[in-house]
Amino acid sequence: MTTRIGVVGIGWWATTNHIPTVQSCPDAEVAAICDLNADRLRVVGEKFSIAGRYTDLGEMLAREALDGVMVSTPHVAHTAPAIAALEADCHVLVEKPMATTAADGRAIAAAAKKAGREVLVPCSLNFTDFSAKAASMVRAGRIGTVRHAVCQMGSALDDLFAGEPMLETADHLFRPPASTWADPAKAGGYGWGQMSHSLAWLCYVADIRFESIFCMDGKSKTGVDLYDAAVGRAINGATVSLSGSATVPKHVGMHVDVRIYGTEGCLFFDTERARLELRRLDGGDETVALTQEQTTYDGALPVRKFVALCSGRPIVNGADGENGARVAEALDALYRSARSGRLEQTGG
Ligand SMILES: NC(=O)c1ccc[n+]([C@@H]2O[C@H](COP(=O)([O-])OP(=O)(O)OC[C@H]3O[C@@H](n4cnc5c(N)ncnc54)[C@H](O)[C@@H]3O)[C@@H](O)[C@H]2O)c1
């Protein structure tokens, strides 16, 4: 049986990544699309041969008998469609950041639990086999109790967060707009836009939830954060140093570097050097062999996992509703702190 997927928000990323990836899966189809922009529905519907086109999500959910819904609206518009799709009994892929307030993040996670459906936030690194292995090492106590972490990320996106066209999207059907990425009133900026990835990895692998965060930032010309320097405390007392930078040269690209320190050892993960290493105080070290290709960002991977989930096949969900809520509450506190100049509680 063909798995029926609906897509809400058919802008840059949905048309570049989500729709083509679902259409490349042999057992799935994009049965319907929904967007507020009727012109886009026509253009995208024709280009990808999708018959079901809606400006009203309720109508799409009522008519289409969908197995899964992918929400790829701007950051600030994820919550209502995600909850509506969960209440319609669908599994839901919600783009990162899953929500832009702690309360909305918790509301989505609670709606998933109530509906008995899965939320998957497509932070691709979380869906790799090596990340699942890293998470299981920490859960098995291989580094002991987590006491400290360093979580650093850099991206070559100074144009995007300055409200300019992103260089490498010149030939895409739609380009990522300043309104989604570079408007401080709509959760633009590096934290929501990119550190949502590194935080998702940290919260998943280290299994931590933040209690409080203090942040200083540096801004782009549109007034969103290009740089974030933050410290946080996790609920278990662990201290965390968080850093993000949008101005990596284009020819270098994105990197994530996370180090997790525990009472019995530490875990080092670094996409640039393709490194995942367990280093134990007793010398019982382990190196997970990784290639550069394995640590290169793969936007299709979580979409293929989502299709598998919607088809009833088992998956390891490395960024579920709980993970998305932890990231949302951390970033909510981080931005409040950058504004207030004070340490802020997460309040999730
Ligand atoms: N996981 C990743 O690697 C990755 C990569 C790129 C983008 N994203 C995420 O994807 C999301 C979309 O980014 P984008 O650059 O494609 O944005 P975009 O602005 O290009 O597209 C958003 C689309 O949503 C539509 N829309 C807005 N509100 C709506 C609503 N309430 N109902 C239906 N449609 C609505 C808009 O008309 C637009 O077509 C963002 O949250 C972004 O963080 C994730």
Image (spheres, rainbow, N blue to C red):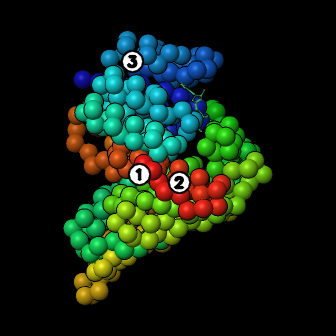
SS at mark 1?
Answer: helix
Q: Amino acid at mark 2?
A: Ala
Q: Is residue 292 left or right of residue 228?
A: left
Three-letter code for the amino acid on which mark 1 is drawn: Arg
Q: Position of residue 124 (x, y in %)?
A: 43, 51
Q: Quadrant of residue 277?
A: bottom left
Foreground: 14 or 219?
219
| Front residue (pair 220, 250) | 220
In the rendered view of the protein, which quadrant contains the N terminus? top left
Residue 315 placement, left or right of 331: left
Quadrant in which residue 87 is drawn: top left
State the residue at coordinates (46%, 19%): 57
Q: Position of residue 257 (x, y in %)?
A: 49, 68
Q: Which mark is residue 333?
A: 2
Can you identify the residue that label 3 sits on?
61
Residue 337 visible somewhere in the drawing? yes
- Residue 302, above or below 230: above
Helix, strand or loop at label 2? It is helix
Q: First in sequence: mark 2 or mark 1?
A: 1
Q: Which residue is the site of mark 1?
A: 326
Residue 77 placement (x, y as % from top left): 54, 32
Query: Spatial distance from mark 1 to mark 3, Cα to Cα?
Result: 28 Å
Instruction: Tell me the mark number nearer the camera, choosing from 1 and 3.
Output: 1
Residue 303 showing in the rendered view: no
Closer to the N terminus: mark 3 or mark 2?
3
